[in-house]
Structures are given as C-alpha cells and as structure tokens.
Image: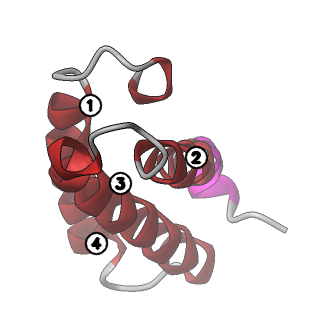
Amino acid sequence: MLNAKFRDCIEACKRCADACNTCSVACLQEENVAEMSRCVRLDLDCAAICRLAVSAMVRDSEFSKAICQLCADLCEACAEECNKHDHEHCQ
C-alpha cells in the first residue's frame, strides 16, 4: 500500500517516469537523433530519479526530502528541454 503521506507525489512520479520513458524511446526514432540526444539523456535521468523518489517515499526514507528536491530539479530541466522540441511525445 502506498504511504498515504506521499500518495499524490508517488502517483505523479510514476506518471512522470512513464512519460519520460515513452519520450526517450520516441526521441530515438526521430529522423535526426543527434538533435534529440540531450532530451533522451534527461528523459532517462528523470525517469530514474522519479522511480528512486517513489521508492524513498514508499519506505518513508529519511532522505525522501533531499531525493524529491533533486527529482523536482531534474524534472524541471527535462521539461525545459522537451519544450524546445515540437514533437508530440515531448509535450
């Protein structure tokens, strides 16, 4: 069962990780993959930190706050990069 204290954040992190994984795969199928390389890297990093944050929150880790702050920072960087691209998967 999800830690009730973090339920909404856990669900948001799961959705974000899934969206980032979907975006990274789609980016790799674009015509000019080289132009998408930063997007792919950030997608992979974002998905990984989101999954780590979920794990930390579920366990009520003493490091949840620090992990979630890093997660938020990485999610912002990923969103900024994705906003530079017109592809539907980046939106």
In this picture, residue 6 sits left or right of residue 77: right
Q: Are marks 4 and 3 in contact (CB under 8 Å)?
A: no
Disc 1 from disc 4: Cα separation: 22 Å
In this picture, residue 44 sits left or right of residue 88: left
Disc 4 from disc 2: Cα separation: 23 Å
Upstream in the sequence, badge 4 or badge 3? 3
The kind of residue tagged 2 is Thr
Q: Secondary structure at mark 4?
A: helix
The residue range painted magenta reads: 4-11
Can residue 62 be seen at all in this image of the molecule? yes
- The location of residue 84, given as percent across then percent down, is 16, 22
Question: Label 3: which residue?
Answer: 43
State the residue in front, 44 or 26.
26
At a point 59% along the width and 83% down the height, the residue shown is: 59
The kind of residue tagged 3 is Asp
Question: Label 1: which residue?
Answer: 82
Q: What secondary structure predominates along the stretch shown in magenta?
A: helix
Question: Label 2: which residue?
Answer: 22
Q: Secondary structure at mark 3?
A: helix
Upstream in the sequence, badge 3 or badge 2? 2
Give the quadrant of residue 4. bottom right
At a point 52% along the width and 43% down the height, the residue shown is: 26
- Between circles 4 and 2, the one closer to the viewer is 2
Residue 6 belongs to the span the image colors magenta: yes
Quadrant where the image shows the C terminus: top left
Q: Are marks 1 and 3 in contact (CB under 8 Å)?
A: yes
Disc 4 from disc 3: Cα separation: 17 Å
- The location of residue 82, given as percent across then percent down, is 26, 31
